[in-house]
Image (cartoon, rainbow, N blue to C red):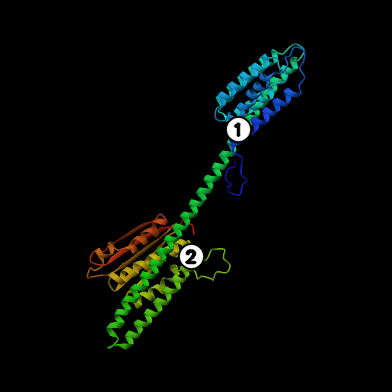
Amino acid sequence: MRTPTRNGRRPRVRPDVFDAVVAGVLVAWMVLSILTKTAEPGQHANTVWTYLLAVGLSAPYAVHRRHPMIALTVLLAALLAFALGGYAAFPGVSAFALLFGIALHADRRQALTALLATAAALTVAVLVQPSGIVDRASLISTALATLVCWLGGQNLRQRRARWAALRAQNARLEREREERARRAVTEERLRIARELHDVVAHAMSVIAVQSGVANHLIDTQPGTAREALAAIESTSRSALVEMRQLLGVLRHDDGDTGAPALAPAPGLADVGGLIRQVADGGLDATVRVQGPAVAVPPGVDRSAYRIVQEALTNAIKHGGPRAEILLAYSDSDLTIEVTNDDPAGRGGPRLVNAGHGIIGMRERVAVYGGEFSASPRPGGGFRVAARLPFANSGP
């Protein structure tokens, strides 16, 4: 009899059950009126037909939602028969209730039809009463009651429509909020995946080069081999620290006051340390700054560092022994250019078809609506260039 509870709301009675209960109340009301009403001069005594007509006046309310016009026809027919029969009880209450229900639940055309038909039937029912029972005031009050019932149903219908529209809007806004939250989580996961790739790829490249040097020189030049092993240790420790920071972001919410303090993500200010790391891997890198170094948003700063890091990592794996980093600042963007020499021409085609490194750099630039290119240089070597606008960039 009740719909399932949702969102902690109280269960609601099913509409068909509610209508059946109201119809039962109307039948009881009519029967009680017939039993208690004394016939006036000119009115007929109650018979079994009186009670049958009372049922016909009240029972149609039970089906008015599904069959409004059928319910209206049956009730008005019983109303006219009751009035023409000259029985004592006034049958208007059931007509008012049905008119209210149709105005509330049916469409506008059916509601207007119900208003006109009910008004006409009630007017006839009042006018056929014996003289002295009704007067002009009775006719006016019946007409006003009819109009009030219809307007009440229409007003409640419009209010319910507005409530439904507000609920639908709230549900849509909630879905949009959840979708934005899901997108934010996905974007954050992609960002962390890019960060992890850059950290691991750079560290593994340096470790691979230095382990090869150590393995090659361990017998003949143990001092150089120890330096290579020390570089491996330093690079691996640095990579572990960065990975712990990134994993800490996954483990702790922003509002978790018990979370350990995380060091800030590396930025352009840390390029010097990055150059020292790649020097351990055998790459001689230099930095050249063009224009005054203006403050850039944190997101651009992190992305610029990662682009430089990935470009140097690729140079260690595929390029020559030297690389140059150009950082060109303007009031609205930052241009990064990393070039490396490779007279033997080892780096071109392999790096163009590289895996996640080039994709990751391109995605970082795309986030800010910038420009990115990666291509072999004439005569050997490779060039990575990126422009990161930051005039309207967020954090």
Residue 58: x %, y % from top left: 64, 26
344 vs 369, left or right, is left
285 over 386 or under it: above or below = below
In the picture, the quarter occupied by the N terminus is: top right
228 over 146 or under it: above or below = below
Residue 274: x %, y % from top left: 40, 73
Separation of marks 1 and 2 at Cα, in angstroms: 50 Å
104 vs 266, left or right, is right
Within 10 Å of disc 1 (Cα), the crowding (few <14, some 14-19, many 20+) is some
| Location of residue 214 by image quarter | bottom left
Q: Is residue 143 visible?
A: yes
Residue placed most toward the observer, 181 or 99: 99
The residue located at (45%, 64%) in the rendering is 301
Q: Is residue 291 visible?
A: no
- Amino acid type at mark 2: Leu
Residue behind mark 1: 157
Residue placed most toward the observer, 66 or 54: 54
The residue located at (28%, 69%) in the rendering is 318
Residue 378: x %, y % from top left: 24, 64
**Label placed on residue 250:** 2
| Location of residue 48 by image quarter | top right
Secondary-structure class at tag 2: helix
Residue 262: x %, y % from top left: 51, 70
365 vs 144, left or right, is left
Residue placed most toward the observer, 24 or 307: 24
Secondary-structure class at tag 1: helix
The residue located at (37%, 63%) in the rendering is 336
The residue located at (63%, 23%) in the rendering is 56
260 over 37 or under it: above or below = below
